[in-house]
Amino acid sequence: MDLQFKISKDFIEEIQEFVSNDDRGAILNAISTLHEADIAEILDVVSMEEAKYIFRLLEDENASDVLVELEEDVRVKFLDALSAKEIAEQMDNMDSDDAADIMAEMSEEKQEEVISQIEDPQQAIDIAALMQYDEDTAGAIMGTELICVNENWTTDQCIEEMREQAENVQYIYTVYVVDNQKRLTGMLSLKSLLFAKKGTLVKDIYIENVRYVDSYESLEEVASMMKKYDFVALPVLNPDKILIGRITIDDVVDIIQEEAEKDYQMASGISDNVESSDSILALTRARLPWLIVGLIGGVLGAEVIGLFEEQLGDFPQIALFIPLIAAMAGNVGVQSSAIVVQGIASNNIDLTGISGRLLKELGVALLNGIVCSIIILLFIFLVKGDLTLGLTVSLSLLAVIIFAGIFGTLIPLLLHKRNIDPALATGPFITTTNDVIGLFLYLYIGYLFYF
Amino acid sequence: MDLQFKISKDFIEEIQEFVSNDDRGAILNAISTLHEADIAEILDVVSMEEAKYIFRLLEDENASDVLVELEEDVRVKFLDALSAKEIAEQMDNMDSDDAADIMAEMSEEKQEEVISQIEDPQQAIDIAALMQYDEDTAGAIMGTELICVNENWTTDQCIEEMREQAENVQYIYTVYVVDNQKRLTGMLSLKSLLFAKKGTLVKDIYIENVRYVDSYESLEEVASMMKKYDFVALPVLNPDKILIGRITIDDVVDIIQEEAEKDYQMASGISDNVESSDSILALTRARLPWLIVGLIGGVLGAEVIGLFEEQLGDFPQIALFIPLIAAMAGNVGVQSSAIVVQGIASNNIDLTGISGRLLKELGVALLNGIVCSIIILLFIFLVKGDLTLGLTVSLSLLAVIIFAGIFGTLIPLLLHKRNIDPALATGPFITTTNDVIGLFLYLYIGYLFYF
């Protein structure tokens, strides 16, 4: 099939028509070639009643995949509507990591009910174990479905054993090799297994020195490692070095994207991880905190201007360029902090050191500042014919750009050194502080020039 | 091995010491357990002479991987320093897609020299063919190394043929199935191949309906498809539906992250894709355009204030809250546009339609606006004891928040509808426009109140 399925209004309306006509055949026919991710997209947008109707038409294997692919807020409502037994049936078909994630979205009471109704006891144990891990650790996103062979086996024995294990595994990414104590010793490429001569021992063809993570390792570390080394799967060990699971790249892709998006949202002054499809209330709640910070900054700005109110009464032309100075202070701060935050995120910063970064930013700020100052000096002098004002604005603009650049660079670096997420600082704090201090610099320089 | 290798200053200094002592054994010993990505990180930070020294100690297989992993700007210098013959040797060992990418970084003259010196004629042809694709298409990032079997073969024949093909393929992600005309008809899971009975025909066990992309498809589409469907590899077809390559998830992870980072950079007013490690000049060039836009906005703001200069002379207290209004207009615009841009990036927007989005934003803006207005009204009235000023500021703040929210939502949606990247609008354009119009609203409302 070419390309992805693009959901259209017409298609949705057609499906809704089928549902209201109780035409099961037509629905199944319409969605038969769709991927589970596409079916989930449909359920995300139709009404809850319609979604349940369609969901119950799906085969078990399909249904559990669709459940995994649903948007979280839709799924929460869905789980409410399904009985514990229905959910347990789906969980029997899921990868343990997906099941554990979904389990975490239910009330404790319902969790217990569902766990007790899962048919496969091993699956129930795996899910319960996975739920013990902290949300942001490798353990929380690993799956327990993996193919694992003993280093002392022959390749024929391997294939025999793998046949059994593979029943629960959708894709074989890698075959892990363990010793008699189940400790990870290496991995076996399917390629070498496929091409090995009869009777070859695993220990003679496996790859040693395999990279792994501990189950309590942070997701950020896992994501950066998989990205750096181009892994499609990564084994997870417990503190005794025993192989307990594996993390696959598809789970990590989401984390990588979320990390990058989170930085962007924070820099835009959005504090929760919201999406455009969230409710008005959720969106407001995520946005109000920064606006309040901005408000406080504005009040402080008013106080700063108040200090110079008398002078402004005498020379009102100074007021004309207040917005320019404030805006430029904010812009420069956002730029310099964005570069530092992205540098930190991609591990690019540590080697240069703080003083190196600051010197570089000073260079950038000087260049940008000189260009901007000359432009505004020429403009005010030539167009307004006011040299004093031109000098005031251009000199304070230079000072403001340098200060804002240094400040925007320094704050994220200091936060990072104290292990605080530097993205916190990019939006509200840096812009607002730069605004206020920029204003003060401008008015103070104006004061020096005019008196 | 646990975790990723973290490069340290001490380690680098040690390596540099070894280089200056000409101690090859010590260098090879120090880097022997490192991944090529780690070795590349070392070469990225030492001097060019030291880097070349270390590079020439590496074995061929290693050296080509390190070359692929280098930072682009370091690699460009590196390629300059190596002879065409040396580069060609490395390219013989590379995946064709990596080789084509690196080839594109050289002058046309050097490209021809290198191509002519590549030993394996098929590799030279593949690289030259890949270089014909537009930078942002599936063809440009696909690799030609893949495992492909005929649907009429038996599984034993497959394994025999695959053994030969696999020599050039590092990981087998998927086995593709083609008909006699080399047209893609499906794929074969290694699992089913491994467990098939002797004599089974491929056509009896392969998976039909495999998703693919055309070679001219955009990278954005490829990335969104692989992410949505959790693919680790995706086949690429030419217009005759003949299988010509495959795209692997590790290449796409980089694209997904770059896309997210690009949106963030644009919103921060950084126009080129720069990194903190780039030169001062490159960083300045990427940042100056937005600052100039901000400057123009500031000048327009000055003009707006100029319209009301007389009134400001009579009631200078109005000037106090100019920065507050401008900052809030900018903040709200950045927030609302960020949500729309991310929604568009994740294909979340199209179903709601423009009017639905605008209504929602109106709701959010009203809520945020009312809360902020009440706060500022109470503050100015209770602390400053000035009800007229309080009403002026709070009413215009409400108007500005609503206007900025609607404007920040509408512009990216309209750009997207006209197939222009909506991220373009988020930073400079929306903030600056909101600043200027917000100022005008404020001063005009002030004018109405005071006269």
Image (cartoon, coloured by chain):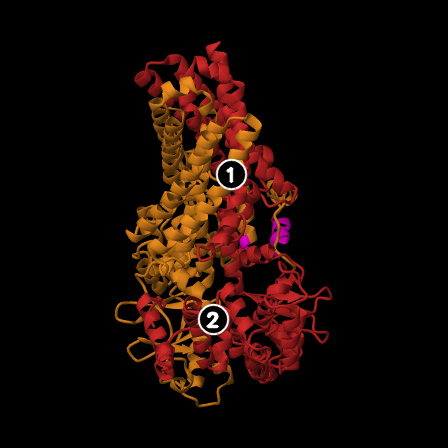
Chain colours: A red, B orange
Circle 2: element type: loop
Q: Are marks 1 and 2 on the same chain?
A: yes
Residue B19, percent across and down? Answer: 59, 43
Q: Which residues are magenta?
A: B24-37
**Chief secondary structure of the magenta portion:** helix
Numbered mark located on residue B374 in the image = 1
Q: Is residue B218 left or right of residue A68?
A: left
Q: Is residue B160 visible?
A: yes
Q: Which quadrant is home to the N terminus of chain A?
A: bottom left
Q: Dot 2, how many residues are within 10 Å of its Cα: few (below 14), some (14-19), or many (20+)?
A: some
For label 2, the residue is B172
Residue A238 sits inside the magenta stretch:
no
Q: Earlier in the sequence, mark 1 or mark 2?
A: 2
Tell whether B108 sits left or right of B346: left
B239 above or below A313? below
Q: CA distance from mark 1 to mark 2?
A: 63 Å
**What is the x, y in percent for residue A288?**
52, 45
Secondary structure of residue under mark 1: helix
Q: Position of residue B400 (x, y in %)?
A: 41, 38
Q: Chain of mark 2?
A: B
Label 1 chain ID: B
Q: Is residue B61 left or right of residue B285?
A: right
Q: Nearer the viewer, mark 1 or mark 2?
A: 1
Pick the residue in front: A424 or A202: A424
With respect to residue B190, does A432 lie above or below?
above
Q: Amino acid at mark 1?
A: Ile
Q: Give the quarter of the image for residue B8.
A: top right
Q: Relative to B438, does residue B170 appear above or below in the rendering?
A: below
Q: Quadrant of residue A179?
A: bottom right
